[in-house]
Image (spheres, rainbow, N blue to C red):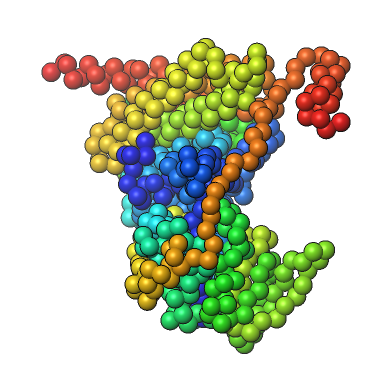
Amino acid sequence: MKIGVLIKQVPDTESKIRIGPDGSDIVREGIKYVMNPYDEYAVEQALQIKEKVGGDSTVTVVSLGPASVGETLRTALAMGADRGVHLKDDLFAGQDALATARALSAALEPEGFDLLFAGKMAIDDNAAAVPTAVAEMLGMPHVNLVFGFTLGDDQRSATVRRRIDGGEEVVECALPALFTCEKGLNEPRYASLTGIMKAKKKPIEEKNAAALGLGPEQVGPDGSGARRTRILPLAERGACKFIDGEPREAVRQLVQLLRGEAKVI
Amino acid sequence: MLHLLNDEERRLQQAAREFADRDIAPQADAMSREGRFPAALLRRAAELGFLGMLVPKELGGQGQGNFALALVLEEINRACASVGVTVSVHNSLATSPILRFGSEALRRKYLPLLARGEQLGAYCLTEPQAGSDAAALVTAAVRDGDTYVLNGTKLFVTTGAEAGLYIVFARTDTAHKTRGITAFVVERASPGVSVGKVEVKLGLRASHTVEILLQDCRVPAANVLGEVGEGFKIAMHTLDGGRIGIATQSLGIAQACLDAAARFALAREQGGEPVARSQIVEQKLAVMATEIEAARLLTYSAARLRDQGQPCAKEASMAKLFASQTCNRAAREALQVHGTYGYLEDFPAERFFRDARVTELYEGTTEIQKMVIARHVLKQYAG
């Protein structure tokens, strides 16, 4: 089986995010980038299917972004993916989910994947838009928020469980199809040192807009349907107060603070 | 120190950091409190490749050197010094001598087991009357046909209860002191090997330190490492790597101390502002950070020398000396920055303080390190 995984590089959740002076973007310097956590479930699922089906099954990871994305693709290769495709072009800068989906679909179309996995959403913009748009553009069925996946015995269909309000839904889907992955789908492996060493030799193909057959009016701000105008910070949280002293007195102080400052009682 | 690492080294460090933060750190306090040896964590470390760092790839290891091992050990020790010492001893004291001095047959037999973590390794040198004066050991090894019969008691064996393979130093010749010692690979399963007393220690409580009793223990003659009578030389060569290991342990603990102290100082408010704003606390953190950086460079430099096959006894001793003293100072100051909270089990400062103390004692006390260094320094001038 030929399995593809869409991955995105995002800021580490532990990074301190600061808004740039003109409010159009976050400050990118000094940020540590990682694989989008939900994409780890996607990569793991792809690897598990590959291991189960065996034969000449392969896992390809695809990502769109600047040069730094190469590291995240390498991480996926270290986990066990076979090859990477990096969509890289200055023309992609500032584009929205629609343009990104357009570029990804152009790269995925000729590959003929039997199965596509993606994380349910990226933790930087929470858009959850790209995978669904990609499936639509490729004319594939898609199921999102999958937390249980079983490949059909004929390998031409899959039965999945997805979360819905108050319960779960069981969906059967013919392949090829795209599935977005929810937490709990599996336990992502981390790269062993052997995997990390092997990854160095695995191929990562770079493709720019022209190689994808896309002109400047189809990508970037001109190819986008939406434009982000401003980012605003969240309201600040105060530092942690430690309350010392005799238990009776400490409790008195705590109650005072909860009533007067936090205003929760 | 990132600027000194190449891409491969950065990835190794990252992999070790993730293992430390995700798997080890959440359990570290509990393991220490319960005195529980984390067998599952060691299995995980094996799966990820950390127990076979120095073993060649053809024998199932990572084919890495001391520099890469140091990167991995620093991260592990930052999360938990007990797991750190277990992984350190396994790689530097048990695997390394077999790799360097074992016959082809011994290497093929034991290195894959160690690399896969199927057997954990331990090191048996110290005895009741032979600590700093290691050459005074009396455990006897008497030749009988194609075996040796070992009798004696070994003390302070890290991972002694859980290990399947021991490097044992015994006396084959009573006429000569250092040249009468031979190194053996002894399997735990051999008849005559038993685990004696389990020590109750101040720190490193998730690492079990035991007595190993050898009573008419039979070991094949083929299990001699190097030549008969080469044991002391092997012990000293191995300890150079071990000292780099303890230096990196000290770095890990010291870094954990700095992390904890800085975070606490930024969170804790007194007089309406974080105590980190106080110049007194600032100075403590500045000194801590600077000494850690200096210790780090000494340590990795020694590791690099060893990988280049150069003599590194002086540099390894300097690294161990300075890093262990740094980590004890850092632990003391980190506890102090926490104020009385530092005295409680609720905060990690007290575990770092207790764990730090042993780094100036084992694999050569601070005093021994200074002796070793002085000898090398004076040799340069003696002409």
Residue at position x 35%, y 50% in the image: B7
Q: Quadrant of the N terminus of chain B?
A: top left
Given residues A98 and A147, the one toward you in this image is: A98
Q: Point out residue B366 in the picture as x, y percentages from the top left corner.
A: 42, 19
Above or below, B283 against A21 in this view is above
Residue B307 visible in rendering: yes
Residue at position x 45%, y 57% in the image: A94
Given residues B255 and B157, the one toward you in this image is: B255
Q: Point out residue B32 in the picture as x, y percentages from the top left corner.
A: 65, 33
Q: Point out residue A85 in the picture as x, y percentages from the top left corner.
A: 41, 68
Residue at position x 52%, y 35% in the image: B78
Residue at position x 48%, y 72% in the image: A102
Given residues B339 and B165, the one toward you in this image is: B339
Q: Is residue A158 left or right of residue A199?
A: right
Q: Point out residue B171 in the picture as x, y percentages from the top left corner.
A: 40, 33
Residue B136 visible in rendering: no
Residue at the far left: name it: B383
Q: Quadrant of the C terminus of chain B?
A: top left
Above or below, A202 against A75 in this view is below
